[in-house]
Amino acid sequence: MSTKNKLAKKPINSPSFFIGRGGNDGIISFGSGQPDLVPPKEIFKNLENNRLFQYGLIQGELNLRQLLSKEYPHASCENFVITNGASEALDLAMRVLATEPGPQKVLLCRPYYYSYPFNVRLAQMEPVYTDLQDGRINLKDFKEKIKHVKAVLINSPSNPTGMVEEINTLKEIEKLSRKLKVWVISDEVYKDLIYGRKNYIIKGPRVITINSFSKTYAMCGLRVGYLWTPDKNFVQKVIDMKVHTSMNTNIMGQEMSVAAMQAPKSYIKQQVKIWHQRRDLIYKGLNQLGFKVRKPEGAFYVLPYIKNSNRVVSELFYKYKVIVYDGTWFGAPDHIRLSYALDVSKITEGLGRIKEFLKDKQDWLD
Ligand SMILES: Cc1ncc(COP(=O)(O)O)c(C=O)c1O
């Protein structure tokens, strides 16, 4: 099939159009948040074992849960469920939450990770929104809206903004959720990818922490994640739902995750150093092109302003072979989201193509 045919123009309305694309085909992908770095080499050892292909505990392998419980103060391995990435953890958490007493509403910070509204609606609940102010939670609005919901979803560092919430804000949310008996789903998939300060992990009796091996350990495709909460009853409900949906999470991935956690911690430090350099490069580059953009503080995303974002996504892909995501998918129309989880040379080449694209469209940046 010719390249022309392969890129026959279809409308681009969802990230599913792009996920998994962008290999050696001349495409520069600022799309999917998929690290190009390699996972710790330790994960490839000891894989010749039949057990890795069998069914496993629905809750997840004990050795992995034990290791994970040491990462969080006061956590027990009994309170973890290993899932198919953070994605399944989010889905199960929402569907179990829907069975808990309280209003069927979940508060999301907007812009949000594109799956959140779908996760909420698929669980037959209703998403309600608080708009970020200068990239951060507007506590006044948040405090008002939290009174009317069953749960709030926090994601810091954030996809798509790359912003990190102030520690005081996170502590205030902890306090409010205790007082109002509101659940907090804390999506911590970028907890290790933070440039300025140490992260602060939200704690509390109704906090459901979600994380995965996709980003920190560059193991996206393996689909291993987890949730944990101090509420044992909630954990049991998640297990009871998972047994009738995906069953156990793949055992090989879990064993590889154990090996990843046992690799020297210098692996994570080294990764963060690389993300940091790339952050500086893309931030400077976008500024030079005339974009209004906030400097990311964590994760590996930027969300610059540009008019006609859907057209931008389509033209950049079909004419310039550059993938960027439409801010509209994240509740941020007139923005595009770029992932900088790609090599420096590709970032530079991609920015060059965007410069070409912008030649007759400077007014789209105003
Ligand atoms: C904020 C956020 N949550 C969850 C996920 C899903 O991650 P996983 O690959 O672990 O399913 C992503 C992936 O990009 C994400 O950005």
Image (cartoon, rainbow, N blue to C red):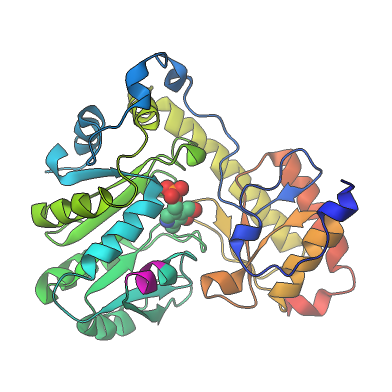
Residue 129: say if magenta. Answer: no
Residue 337 lies, in percent from the top left, at: 61, 63
Residue 126 lies, in percent from the top left, at: 34, 80
Residue 100, placed above or below residue 89: below
Q: Quadrant of residue 26?
A: top right
Whether residue 107 is visible here, answered yes or no, is yes
Which of the two residues, 144 or 149, is positioned nearer the viewer here? 149
Which of the two residues, 364 or 285, is positioned nearer the viewer here? 364
Residue 328 lies, in percent from the top left, at: 59, 74
Which of the two residues, 130 or 125, is positioned nearer the viewer here? 125
> Of all residues shown, which one is farthest toward the front?
244
Q: Which residue shows up at 73% across the image and 70% down it?
A: 11
Q: Which residue shows up at 37% across the image and 63% down it?
A: 165
Q: Residue 236 vs residue 167: left or right?
A: left
Which of the two residues, 121 or 203, is positioned nearer the viewer here? 121
Whether residue 188 is visible here, answered yes or no, is no
Q: Residue 274 vs residue 231: left or right?
A: right
Q: Residue 196 vs residue 329: left or right?
A: left
Q: Residue 9 vs residue 201: left or right?
A: right
Residue 121: say if magenta. Answer: yes
Residue 129 lies, in percent from the top left, at: 39, 80
Q: Dominant secondary structure of the magenta stretch?
A: helix
Magenta stretch in the rendered image: 119-123
Residue 360, placed above or below residue 260: below
Q: Quadrant of the C terminus?
A: bottom right
Q: Which residue shows up at 57% across the image and 65% down it?
A: 294
Q: How many marks?
A: 0
Residue 114, placed above or below residue 261: below
